[in-house]
Image: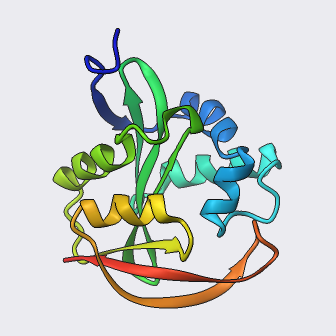
């Protein structure tokens, strides 16, 4: 199947997806760009336990991104202090193909939480473009400790109303 014929689909994330999604989040450049990761992204037991808990949480809408018949990444809505936020992770082999943007646009058709917030490290230009192409507007900045970088890192805050 040529890439022109491949279609992006979203489906509810299942436990059987977690192995592939875990492997994606081990990518060193991806970890650096995401910045705000768990303390040890290589701790598979921690990852699996946490993700299995998330799959049972009714406030989390976790979807697996399929590109053709391959898992390309994940996208989810979660809440921090009752405020909906968006998160996504695309496997490196699927970068720079419009998959994140198209998946987010598709996700937002069924995820009705508004306003919904997105955050990205100040230097994660790719993620900033994904949010902006999906209608998110930058509304401010924040600083927090980024485990992936071992230091405080600025992030941009985006909102979709």
Image spot of residue 126 (x, y percent): 46, 58
Q: Is residue 141 left or right of residue 12?
A: right
Viewer-nearest residue: 10 or 103: 103
Residue 24 vs residue 44, the one in the foreground: 24
Q: Position of residue 96 (x, y in %)?
A: 44, 42
Where does residue 152 sit, x and y in percent of width and height? Answer: 72, 85
Please state the horizontal and vertical placement of residue 21, each as a whole percent of the image.
60, 38
Q: Which quarter of the picture shows residue 146?
A: bottom right
Say which residue appears at 27% left-offset and 20% top-offset: 4
The quarter of the rendered structure image containing the C terminus is bottom left
Quick one: 104 or 1, which is closer to the camera? 1
Q: Is residue 6 above or below residue 155?
A: above
Relative to 124, 23 lies left or right:
right
Q: Residue at x 62, y 31 (%)?
A: 20
Q: Residue furthest top?
A: 1
**Would you place residue 66 above or below residue 35 in this image?**
above
Please tell me which residue is depicted at 82% across the width and 49% down the height of the picture.
43
Residue nearest the observer in this picture, 89 or 129 = 129
Of the 4 image quadrants, the one containing the N terminus is top left
Q: Quadrant of residue 78?
A: bottom left
């Amino acid at each position: 199947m040529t890439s022109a014929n491949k279609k992006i689909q979203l489906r509810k994330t299942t436990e059987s997806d977690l192995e592939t999604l875990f492997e994606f989040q081990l990518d060193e450049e991806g970890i650096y760009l995401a910045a705000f990761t768990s303390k040890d992204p290589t701790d598979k037991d921690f990852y699996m336990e946490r993700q299995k808990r998330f799959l049972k949480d009714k406030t989390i809408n976790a979807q697996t991104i399929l590109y053709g018949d391959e898992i390309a990444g994940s996208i989810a809505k979660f809440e921090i202090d009752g405020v909906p936020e968006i998160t996504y992770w695309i496997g490196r082999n699927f970068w720079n193909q419009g998959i994140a943007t198209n998946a987010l646009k598709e996700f937002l058709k069924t995820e009705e939480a508004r306003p919904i917030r997105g955050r990205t490290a100040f230097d994660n230009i790719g993620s900033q473009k994904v949010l902006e192409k999906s209608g998110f507007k930058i509304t401010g900045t924040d600083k927090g400790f980024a485990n992936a970088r071992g230091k405080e890192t600025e992030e941009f805050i985006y909102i979709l109303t």
